[in-house]
Image (cartoon, rainbow, N blue to C red):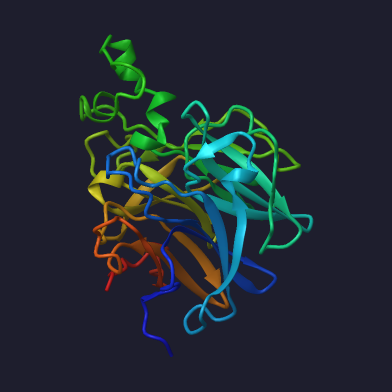
Amino acid sequence: MAKLPRYLFPSDYMADPSANVFNGKLYIYPSHDREAGHAFDDDGGHFQMKDYHVLSFNDVENDEAVDHGVILDVEDVAWAEKQMWDNDVVEKDGKYYLIFSAKDYNGVFHLGVAVADKPEGPFVPQEHPIRGSFSIDPSVFKDDDGQIYCYFGGLWGGQLQWYQAPEKLVKEGVDLGPAGDRKTQLYAPADVPALSSFVVRMSDDVMQFAEAPRDVVILDKNGERLKAGDPHRFFEASWMHKYNGKYYFSYSTGDSHFLCYAIGDNPYGPFTYQGVILDPVVGWTTHHSIVEFKGQWYLFYHDCVPSNDVTHLRSLKVQRLFYNEDGTIQKVINE
């Protein structure tokens, strides 16, 4: 048996793994890191990804990944100019829908949809982005009743702060600064409710939002919203999975470098904060997914160890995930 954790695709730099099980096989839809010559900055300007691949496994602990090649390139997306960041895929009625984030020609992130007949693509993009979509990091969750929900959002370079601000600040007349002023809107003051990600139910054809996006509210154990100054508040990388009838919303805390989770009773929440799944890894942050495959739960994520964190290029990893009897997740140690 392979020693876990292990790197899944040593021959190339991939990040942001969205893992899904289709037709008894595991598929990972990552972003595709490359050295584009851009200097590191807090808005992710050095992450100039331009295409997506898909990797598949029959045995994720021992098999080498099968790389099915490019399934979508930015040049094929009429509305997108650059920075094809995180994506995820969901199946409905035998079709596969890739929801992805990219910047348009005005420098604004939106979510787009591309469709395929097979999990390994190729995917054909829609001409326009999803109406009313914004920000980054879509996670697409199909519930037991067949309803499909999209969780999305990322701060700083992900532009989420452009679209919401703490109501308390606005009501008290606090100057939030110009749109996109991340330091003002994220950190000052630290005792206001943290900015949240969004959740939205998708239309029956999985092409549009079926409703207005709602805040994903994360509460502490006292029933109060996590505050902006809490190192465990949301920053990016939403993921939703279901375990024993409960909804597990997990996410990255970005600049505080944790991978955290909260539990709720329905897809919309609210979700109650539970703890840290993964401590900081080598690299600025991590991005993950959680899925059950052949009776075992797995955590997929990335770090920058193989690239020595010099160019911030990231590599995919996997290891087993376990639950306690009360449904909480046992903390994972990155090795």
Determine the residue located farthest toward the right in the rendered image. 93
Determine the residue located farthest toward the bottom in the rendered image. 1
Residue 310 at x, y = what percent? 24, 58
Residue 25 at x, y = what percent? 63, 73
Whether residue 155 is visible: no
Q: Residue at x 79, y 55 (%)?
A: 93
Q: Is residue 240 left or right of residue 34?
A: right
| In the depicted structure, whether residue 165 falls above or below residue 53 | above
Q: Quadrant of the C terminus?
A: bottom left
| In the depicted structure, whether residue 158 falls above or below residue 13 | above
Whether residue 135 is visible: yes
* Frontmost residue, 147 versus 288: 288
Q: Is residue 308 left or right of residue 237?
A: left
* Frontmost residue, 72 versus 281: 72
| In the depicted structure, whether residue 137 falls above or below residue 260 | above
| In the depicted structure, whether residue 213 falls above or below residue 114 | above
